[in-house]
Image (spheres, rainbow, N blue to C red):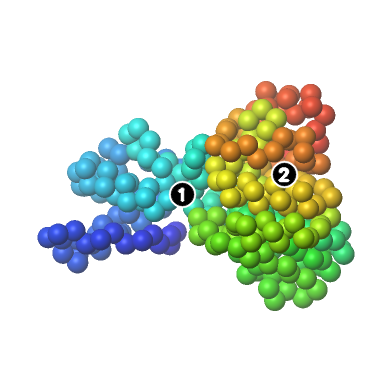
Amino acid sequence: MMLRFPQAVLQTGATEEDQVKREERRQAIMDLLVGARAVDLDDLADRFAVSRMTIHRDLDDLEQAGLLRKVRGGATIEAGTQFESDFRIRALQDSDAKARMARAALELVEPGMTVMVNDGSMAALLGASLTDKAPVTVITNNAAVIDRLKDAPRVTLIALGGTYSAKFNGFFGVVTEDALSRLRADLAFISTPAVAGLRAFHMDDAAVRAKRAMMAAADRAVLLVNHSRFGRSALHALADLTDFDAIITDAAPAPEDRAAIDRAGLRLTIARD
């Protein structure tokens, strides 16, 4: 993985070689996190033959850059109530599951439809696949979707402006929400990093407002959520699961979560190969 982060300020007395080693070590830490999702501080100190304090500083800088969150004894890129990993990290994870969910979502789209696609790496893959349903109109605040569809034939692309977020690789804020209030779509595909009980959550308030605006502007809303995100919460309530016409996931959630969905009479699609 070549995930670049802001370079640390060269410390007093540190040589250029020291700085290069520091950046290479931090790059290696992020590579480990993409694969393992969590790292242990003592293991990192042994692996790189540096002190625990040096690793602490590395993790502090990477956390400040929004690439990880420190936990007791190490760090993780797993979502927390106020943390979601960087878009560039999420884009490298769960590729098979995302592909299956995208294919299941595409079955709901018919040529001639107007479709809204929100931010997120899962949604980015789905958005890029909408060319298979052309002619189609796509409304999105997802920068990755905008980039993939800007030259696509028989795709009318409506790119939502707003304040750009590198963390989520999308556009948010008053401009985004105002534009959505003036538009209408057949379908809105909404992704979420957390589902607890019968409610979806998100850790970013601006993302929540944009997602809600898309749901309000669409005739039908479809929730996209990885099965591992069930049983988790986040800072902001996004919507009740009953607000969605369908829920698409990549594998069966835990029995208690599946039972709650079934009792509520909600439509759950598990994307198969």
**Residue 220 against residue 251 in the figure, above or below:** below
- Specify the quadrant that holds the N terminus: bottom left
- Residues under labels 1 and 2: Cα distance? 25 Å
Q: Residue at x 58, y 38 (%)?
A: 236
- Residue 227 sits above or below residue 153 on the image: above
**Which residue is rendered at x = 70% and y = 41% of the image?**
249
Using a 10 Å C-alpha cutoff, classify the residue at mark 1 as few (fewer than 14 neighbours), some (14 to 19) or many (20 or more).
some
**Mark with earlier residue (1, 2):** 1
119 sits to left or right of 35: right
- Identify which residue is drawn at 60% across, 63% down: 162
Instruction: Report the mark closest to the observer, 1 or 2.
Output: 2
x%, y% of residue 12? 14, 59
Which sits in the foreground, 28 or 237?
A: 237
The answer to whether residue 181 is left or right of residue 26 is: right
In the rendered view, would you say 76 is above or below 110?
above
In the rendering, which numbered label is found on residue 191? none
Q: Amino acid at mark 1?
A: Val
Q: Which residue is mark 1?
A: 34
Residue 168 percent across, percent down from the top left:
55, 55
Q: Residue furthest left?
A: 13
Q: Amino acid at mark 2?
A: Leu
Q: Is residue 269 visible?
A: no
| Image marks 1 and 2: residues in contact by CB distance under 8 Å | no
Q: Is residue 83 visible?
A: yes
Residue 243 place in picture, x, y as percent: 77, 38
Question: What residue would you read off at disc 2?
Answer: 223
